[in-house]
Image (tube, rainbow, N blue to C red):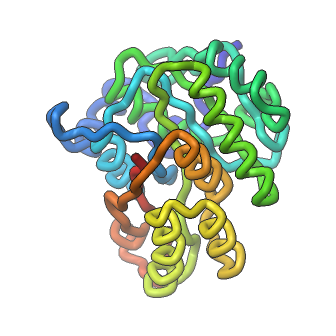
Amino acid sequence: MHRFPAVANQFYPGEAKALQAALARLVPPRAAAEKQKALAVISPHAGYVYSGGVAGETLAAVQIPPDVLIMGPNHQGYGAQVALMHQGSWDMPMGEVPINTTLAGLLLANSAIIKADTLAHQFEHSLEVQVPFLQYLQADLTITPIVVSHLPLSTLLNLGRDIARAIIAYNHPVLLVASSDMTHYESREEASRKDAMAMERIIQLDPEGLYNTVTRNRITMCGVMPATVALAAALELGASKAELIRYTDSGATSGDTNQVVGYAGMVIS
């Protein structure tokens, strides 16, 4: 079972050499000693011209193990509410990336919430745009991709616990990548104000607070569901701190600060 790129040549270069060159510009060089061990990161998923610098800086700040579990929001509305592509590979411009079938099996065995489903992944861009960065930083990459729809807080917290149990059973380092942009199409001033509230809840390691803050303040953070799950899972795995690596918005590229999309890169360790 193979998944082919849905947004190559749209969100990022679709030719291997051009993509490699783009990543070399977006990912700052860091010595191995400078990279921290992390349990989870939150990384944006817009076109690389807009958010690639934040994603590159964030992922360059951490040690990328061979096994990465990527969670993103369901923008398209297809498939199961929590959809795991559990076998096969992703055929990306820089090469094939296998799905970690062992970890996928443990996720299905440890959770009644997660369903084996490929339909949700077919056109979803939020996970796909993370993969070239991970390939660039980890030559032996495997992925375990999950698409998360809108769910109640209690389900998200339970899902985080299920994922943590599966990772503990797997008994190898796994990095969680929660794919999310922040506020959509508001002024820079308003986006910065709202996003600061959401980011503070992440820094405080407060998944319930993140979910409630985004909901009550109508913050259009598209990946709040996977971010809440990743934060809950990281806490179960022993997380003790979270930090903001970089925040910016689309206006930094477009020049339009009246309607921006916010981008945050955060590390949970």
Task: Please tell me whether residue 20 is drawn above or below residue 95 in the rendered image.
Answer: below
Task: Please name the residue shown 63% across and 75% down the image.
Answer: 213
Q: Is residue 202 left or right of residue 102?
A: left
Q: Is residue 128 left or right of residue 27?
A: right
Can you say whether 64 is above or below 185 in the image? Answer: above
- Figure check: 103 above or below 224: above
Q: Quadrant of residue 254?
A: bottom left
Residue 69 screen position, x and y as percent: 56, 32
Q: Residue at x 59, y 53 (%)?
A: 227
Does the rendering let one see residue 11? yes
Q: Position of residue 221 (x, y in %)?
A: 60, 65
Counting labels gives 0
* 70 w.r.t. 110: above or below: below
Q: Position of residue 225 (x, y in %)?
A: 68, 55
Identified at 44% across, 64% down, the residue is: 203
Task: Indicate the position of residue 205 as horizontal and vertical percent values.
Answer: 50, 60
Q: Quadrant of the N terminus?
A: top right
Residue 75 can be seen, yes or no: no
- Is 8 placed left or right of 31 in the picture? right
Between residues 122 and 16, which one lies in front from this camera angle? 122
The residue that appears at 65% across and 31% down in the rendered structure is: 165
Q: Quadrant of residue 263?
A: bottom left
